């Protein structure tokens, strides 16, 4: 059995679905169900005894202790977090509470449990912490991509809170011997991605004939990885990663935001042409994000060299699948949009929404 936290969010739900598609090892899924957590993502597992869903907070030590004692997972995979940079700029409280304080309480509960395991179970136990490349800060256009040794220079409240959690995980290994693994991944995209993030927001806005809000000049660069590839990397690190190590995970696919938006428009023009002409007509430059990191890039050679992992999807195949998924799941989008997503769009984009 494994314990997954945040398994009703974007990456966590993809991970749980992929895991149970490939193995019969059961999953306990602890998720608080914030605005970003959606049970509907896991609807295909309804009635499946291999999936135990528990609504709760990673910061609830008593609950986590109870789950660890009852299910005795061989590993904890920590996806639970507040994850959206723009929200962290509007208010960082939840980011500090979950990403920093919550991770601390989770580590303490896991440490107490792990410390009392029989020797063999203690030796094979793993705590895998899922983190981001944003902890490394922003790169100059010609600087080499982030390696695992890059200095931590987080610039947003989100990335600072994730950096803090990475440091806690590191310290719990160094000081207490907890067998941890950390992954620092670049921007993901794919099914079940909440439409507040760049790629799903552009798809759903375009289909609704709404403006496509590009921050500033749109020349900020991100590395994009298909979510299924992130899930396979996590499985591989869990299986064979060296305890105490961090692994950078990326798609070898750096692109400026504006190029991403135009690719989405081109795919939609092909797959769902609009009578009003190319979706590119909707591209609208809006005020830049404060403190906006200019470039992220991942050097993913360590995970390839040590663990033989490389992404299976190219950006071309992954983005086509993703656009098609959103076209095929208008019901999922409608349900998500009828919730707090709408309030958020109003706060962030005002009349432009
Ligand atoms: P998400 O916002 O879609 O999902 C987060 C999930 O965590 C939600 O289901 C939410 O309900 C749950 N959650 C939040 N606070 C919780 C708490 N206190 N207790 C229990 N559950 C809680 O995020 P995501 O995009 O799926 O990201 C998952 C993880 O991967 C995060 O740690 C994030 O920092 C990291 N990450 C994300 C990306 C990306 O591109 N999305 C890239 C690299 C790393
Ligand atoms: P986002 O998906 O929020 O991920 P992150 O900030 O964690 O990288 O944003 C990806 C990039 O797209 C980032 O440079 C900000 C930009 N962006 C826009 O230009 N417009 C938008 O409406 C959003 C949400 C993001």
Image (spheres, grey):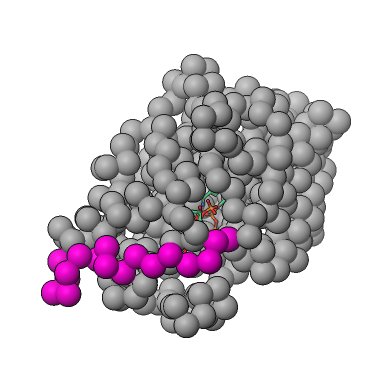
The quarter of the rendered structure image containing the C terminus is bottom left
Foreground residue, 150 or 228? 150
The quarter of the rendered structure image containing the N terminus is top right
Q: Residue at 26% of width from left, 42% of height from top?
A: 317
* Residue 128 showing in the rendered view: no
Residues shaded magenta: 272-289
Foreground residue, 136 or 59? 136
Residue 232 relative to residue 32: left or right? left
In the image, is residue 76 above or below residue 347?
Answer: above
Residue furthest to the right in view is 175
In the image, is residue 236 above or below residue 339?
Answer: above
Give the quadrant of ligand 1. bottom right
Residue furthest to the top in view is 305
Q: Position of residue 337 (x, y in %)?
A: 43, 77
Q: Examine the structure image and report whether residue 285 is included in the region drawn in magenta.
A: yes
Q: Position of residue 216 (x, y in %)?
A: 50, 59
In the image, is residue 204 above or below residue 52?
Answer: below
Q: Residue at 47% of width from left, 44% of height from top?
A: 221
- Which picture quadrant has residue 171? top right
- Which picture quadrant has residue 58? bottom right
């Amino acid at each position: 059995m494994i314990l997954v936290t945040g398994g009703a969010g974007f990456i966590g739900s993809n991970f749980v679905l992929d895991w149970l598609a490939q193995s019969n090892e059961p999953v306990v899924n602890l998720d608080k169900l914030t605005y970003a957590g959606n049970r509907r993502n896991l609807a295909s597992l309804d009635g499946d005894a291999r999936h135990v869903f528990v609504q709760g907070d990673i910061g609830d030590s008593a609950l986590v202790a109870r789950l660890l004692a009852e299910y005795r997972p061989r590993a904890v995979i920590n996806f639970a977090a507040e994850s959206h940079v723009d929200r962290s700029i509007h208010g960082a409280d939840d980011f500090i509470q979950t990403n920093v304080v919550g991770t601390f309480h989770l580590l303490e509960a896991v440490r107490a449990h792990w410390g009392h395991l029989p020797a063999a179970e203690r030796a094979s136990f793993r705590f895998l912490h899922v983190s981001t490349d944003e902890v490394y800060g922003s790169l100059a256009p010609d600087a080499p991509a982030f390696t695992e040794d890059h200095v931590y220079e987080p610039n947003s409240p989100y990335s600072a809170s994730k950096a803090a959690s990475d440091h806690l995980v590191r310290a719990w290994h160094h000081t207490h011997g907890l067998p941890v693994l950390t992954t620092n991944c670049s921007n993901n995209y794919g099914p079940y991605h909440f439409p507040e993030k760049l790629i799903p927001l552009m798809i759903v806005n375009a289909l609704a004939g709404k403006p496509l809000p590009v921050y500033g000049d749109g020349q900020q660069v991100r590395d994009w990885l298909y979510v299924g590839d992130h899930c396979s990397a996590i499985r591989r690190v869990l299986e064979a990663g060296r305890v105490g190590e961090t692994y950078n995970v990326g798609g070898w696919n750096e692109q400026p935001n504006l190029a991403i938006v135009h690719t989405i428009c081109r795919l939609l023009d092909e797959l769902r042409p609009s009578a009003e002409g190319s979706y590119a007509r909707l591209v609208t430059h809006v005020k830049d994000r404060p403190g906006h990191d200019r470039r992220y890039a991942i050097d993913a050679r360590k995970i390839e060299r040590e663990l033989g992992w490389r992404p299976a999807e190219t950006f071309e195949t992954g983005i086509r699948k993703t656009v098609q998924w959103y076209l095929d799941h208008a019901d999922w989008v409608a349900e998500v949009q009828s919730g707090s997503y709408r309030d958020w769009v109003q706060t962030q984009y005002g009349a432009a929404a």
